[in-house]
Amino acid sequence: MKVDGKHFRSIWRERDGWAIGAIDQRRLPHEFVVARLTSCEDAAVAIRDMLVRGAPLIGATAAYGMALAMREDASDAGLKRAYDTLVVARPTAINLKWALDEMHAALAPIDPVERAETAYSRADEIAEQDVEINRGIADNGLKLIEAIAAKKPGEVVNLLTHCNAGWLATVDWGTATAPIYLAHERGIKVHVWVDETRPRNQGASLTAWELGHHGVPHTVIPDNTGGHLMQHGMVDLAIVGTDRVAANGDVCNKIGTYLKALAAHDNGVPFYVALPSPTIDFAVGDGIRDIPIEQRSGTEVTDMTGRTADGRLETVRIVPEGSPVANYAFDVTPARLVTGLITERGVLKPDRASLAAAFPERIAAAAE
Ligand SMILES: CSC[C@H]1O[C@H](OP(=O)(O)O)[C@H](O)[C@@H]1O
């Protein structure tokens, strides 16, 4: 999307045709730094350390990581090593394994001499497919915003989102933000309550940054504010992203999503989840039981990094030395709390039958 009027994507193939450029999201919002990935290991570290993050972008990065790997070693052993290196970079977003399986399916059957070129072509396809899918999510989610706007002509449609499911979490457009950007571009008055999303602050640092640079009105709020806003009729619609949707419609997303869904359910606020179909894991029948929840370093909770009054970036500790810390990166919202799933093929009920009807080819693949 736009950064000060200039169009950017979150990841791209460099002009040299082989290195990969990506926005280093750890440096935002204070610095706009572009990283250059030149090896499979670079791609794996970028995913693990959250230089890139967000389920679809993790998938695209892994795809390009396989392409970088094929430049290094296109043998069968090299292909397996690349897959095994990348697949463990982060455990929760299913897009990582989905992309690697897509790349493996394209590369394993062919002559190693053809693998590097084929890998870059398939990775490009995965990236372009993400943009196209998210544009479809925008169209389908826009209808929900338009329906609310029609009931309150001339007034602002107030949305709430959690974490960053914006264009920074994908190759472009975002998932939860895609309908918001399209509504804004269509002249609908929207305003977004942006959950700061402790401990990594993806909302405060990333969603606020991208909405601001695209000119979308928004307000950053502490994570615990959403319920109060919903009680007072200040949220018309909640839209979040997801890292994995189980076949039964359970939704895994950034920690705190479940609590927001409970508040929305209690206050009759529509709670939608926006996702591209690669985020659906038909192999998982029960999200709460089966989806692995990543636990990250405690320093993400004990420390905070920000800009000092004189412009320096500093990290400070906010938790007493010696206090134990737990850092669960995701939680699972049961399908019963989800109003609908906004996908590229329409807005679906969060249940097995609806997902299978919309994506029969994915059911067949999961059964193989
Ligand atoms: C469109 S997927 C975005 C999804 O990914 C985020 O997690 P992380 O920043 O740890 O990669 C968060 O769960 C978002 O909803």
Image (cartoon, grey):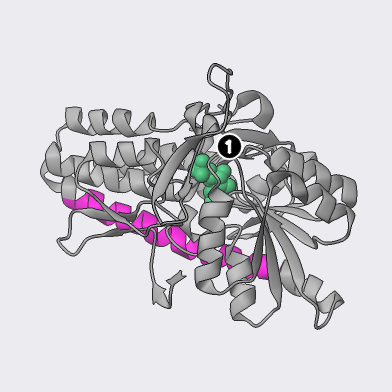
- Where's ligand 1: which quadrant? top right
Label 1 environment density (alpha carbons within 10 Å; few <14, some 14–19, many ≥20): many
Q: Is residue 361 visible?
A: no
Q: Is residue 247 visible?
A: yes
Q: Secondary structure at mark 1?
A: loop
Q: Is residue 65 left or right of residue 269?
A: left
Identify the residue under disc 1: 282
Residue 346, percent from left and from top:
65, 61
Q: Is residue 309 left or right of residue 353?
A: left
Residue 2, percent from left and from top:
45, 72
Residue 124, percent from left and from top:
31, 58
Report the front residue among 357 and 239: 239
> Number of marks in the image?
1
Q: Is residue 256 magenta?
A: no
Q: Residue at x 22, y 61 (%)?
A: 14
- Amino acid type at circle 1 is Phe
Report the front residue among 72 and 301: 301
Q: Residue at x 58, y 70 (%)?
A: 181
Q: Is residue 203 left or right of residue 125?
A: right
Q: Is residue 125 magenta?
A: yes
Q: Is residue 252 above or below residue 310?
A: above
The reply to whether the residue tagged 1 has its Cβ within 8 angstroms of ligand 1 is no
Q: Which residues are magenta?
A: 117-143
Residue 22, percent from left and from top:
32, 54
Q: Is residue 291 left or right of residue 151?
A: left
